Amino acid sequence: MGLPLREELRGIEPYGAPQLDLPVQLNVNENPYAPSEAVVADVAQAVAEATRRLNRYPDREFVELRAGLAAYLGRDVGGGVAPEQVWAANGSNEVMLHLLQAFGGPGRTALSFAPTYSMYPEYARDTNTRWVVGHRAEDFAIDVDQARALIAQERPSVVLLPSPNNPTGTALPPEHVAALCAATAEAGGVLVVDEAYAEFRRAGTPSALEQLPDNPNLVVTRTMSKAFALAGARLGYLAASTEVCDALRVVRLPYHLSAVTQAVALAALRHTDELLGNVDTLRHERDRTVDWLREQGLTVADSDANFALFGTFADRRAIWDGLVARGVLIRETGPEGWLRVSIGTPDEMAAFRAALLEVLP
Ligand SMILES: *Cc1c(COP(=O)(O)O)cnc(C)c1O
C-alpha cells in the first residue's frame, strides 16, 4: 500500500549538507573554536541542576532566558530590547518555521531574493505557503527598486532577508532594510532580517535591531549556532514587537524549549565575552582568506560573515571532490560555478589553501 504522503513531498530527499568525517570541516559555518574547560564546567553544572527537576515540564515561557537574550541584544540597540520582545526556539530554523506557521499558510506568499538560504523554501513548502523568489544583482546586492516592485506585485505576508546573506556574505545597508520594511508593510507583511551571522559583520555595518522601534512589522532573527560557538545546543531567537512574539506563542508546541536547552543557553550567556572571544580572529582570517583567493585570480564576494563564496569554476564539483580527497570539506552551494568555504582556525585555512592550490585548474 502506498503511504498517503503529501503530493509535494513525493520523491523529495531530506535536505542537509553532507556530513563527511574529514579532518578539516569548513562546510556549515560553525565556529571552529570549542568552548573552554571553564565554560564546559559551568554548563555541566547548570545541566546537573536542571536534571534535578527533569520530572517537571520546563518553564513554557522561558522567562529567564528571554531576559538574558534581551540583555545580550541590548548591546546592539540604544533603547534596549524588552524580554517580551524576544522569542526563542530550537535553532533559528525553528524560529523561522514559527514565523511561517503564524504569518504564512495556504493562500499566502513568502518571498526572498536568490541566492539565499536554502531552508526558506522548505519552511514555505511545509506550511503550504506559496514561495516566490526574486533575484539579487550580479554583485549579490539587492536592487531596491526592483525589490519594491516585486513586493508590491506579489504582496507577500513574509519577506525573508538574510543579512549578512548566506551563501554570499552580503550585508544589507540600513537604508535598504528601511525601504524594504516600508514596502513590506504596505503589502501588509512582516520583514524578517535573518542575522545569523550578525556578530561577524564588518565595522560600520549596523544591525537591523536599531530599526525595531520604528517598524512594528520588522523581525530580526539571531542564533547561538555561529559566532556563539554553540551549534550543538540548538538555540535560535528573534527580537520583534510584543505582538509578533505573542503570535508565535500560539503556534509553538507545548514546552518546545527543554529545561536542558534553557539551562545550557543561560550558562552560555554568562560566558558571552569568552564565547565571542574568537570572533575578531575569525573576521581577520576571513579577510585574509578573501584576499588570498583574489590573489589566485578567483572572484570572491565581499563577506560580512564567517565564510567566503568564491568561483567561478566550469566544474565546481571537481574542485569540491579534489578538496575532499585531500581531507578538506567545503560546501557546494550558491549559484552554479561557485563554492563556499567556512572560516576555520589558521591551521585549517592553511590546509584549505594548500589543497586548493593542488586542485585549481
Ligand atoms: C546557519 C544559519 C542559520 C542558523 O540556523 P540554526 O537553526 O540557528 O542553527 C539561520 N539562517 C541562516 C541564513 C544560516 O546560514
Image (spheres, rainbow, N blue to C red):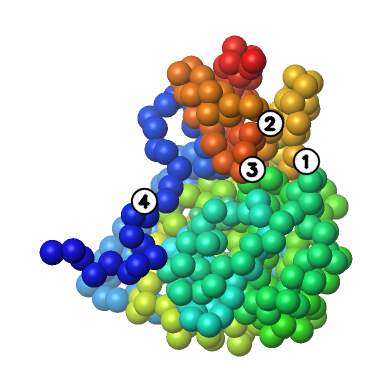
Residue at 42% across, 38% down: 18
Residue with the most extreme top position: 358
Give neighbour class at mark 1: few <14, some 14-19, many 20+ (Cα, 10 Å).
some
Element type at mark 1? loop
Disc 1 residue lies near ligand 1 with CB under 8 A: no
The amino acid pointed to by label 4 is Glu
Element type at mark 2? strand
The amino acid pointed to by label 1 is Asp
Residue at 52% across, 42% down: 28
The amino acid pointed to by label 2 is Gly
Q: Which residue is mark 1?
A: 302
Q: CA distance from mark 3 to mark 1?
A: 15 Å
Q: CA distance from mark 4 to mark 3?
A: 20 Å
Q: In the picture, which quadrant includes the C terminus?
A: top right
Which one is nearer the viewer's eye here, 270 or 216? 216
Q: Which residue is mark 3?
A: 335
Residue 13: image tag: 4
Q: Note whether 257 is above or below 280 in the view shown.
A: below
